[in-house]
Amino acid sequence: MRLFTKSRDGLYQAQALFDGKAIIVLAGSQINMKNNPGYKPSETIRTIRDDRTIVTIDGIVQKDVSFSTLSAAATFVTGRVANGMMVWKTDDGKYVRHSLIKE
């Protein structure tokens, strides 16, 4: 499933692939490099964000980055604690939480 997210203020705009288990934030995505006040990223996320072979100083993702949860990927992109089910949207513009509900 192809996913996307973007902020209203232009701080981030990212694309990802989700197979129901792992999510891959795609190269070319723009992430927010400013962490929200009070937010301390996990060591894993901080290491990835600080590696200039993966993310430029301007927040452009240079290589695909895999995460085990939607929320970890959303946190990586947004620079704050985030619920991935309410951050990522599908191609039709629906939040993932609405797309995964079985009727």
Image (tube, rainbow, N blue to C red):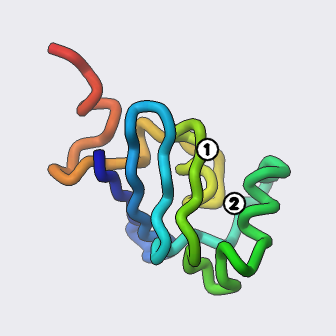
Q: What is the quadrant of residue 46 in the picture?
A: bottom right
Q: CA distance from mark 1 to mark 2?
A: 15 Å
Q: Above or below — where is 86 with respect to 57?
A: above
Helix, strand or loop status at disc 2: loop
The picture places residue 75, in percent across and down from the top left corner, at 61, 51
Q: Quadrant of the N terminus?
A: top left
Q: Residue at x 59, y 70 (%)?
A: 32
Please report contact status of discs 1 and 2: CB closer than 8 Å, yes or no: no
Which residue is drawn at the image coordinates 75% and 59% (left, top)?
37
For badge 2, the amino acid type reads Asn
Pick the residue in front: 29 or 20: 20
Q: Nearer the viewer, residue 33 or 19?
A: 19
Pointer 2: what residue? Answer: 36
Residue beneath the point at 33% across and 52% down: 3
- Res 102 → quadrant: top left
Q: Nearer the viewer, mark 1 or mark 2?
A: 1
Could you tell me residue 55's position as x and y percent?
65, 75
Does residue 24 appear left or right of residue 46 in this picture?
A: left
| Residue type marked 1 | Ala
Q: Which mark is residue 72?
A: 1
Q: In which quadrant is the C terminus drawn?
A: top left
Q: Secondary structure at mark 1?
A: helix
In the picture, measured across the screen, residue 96 lies left or right of residue 82, that is left
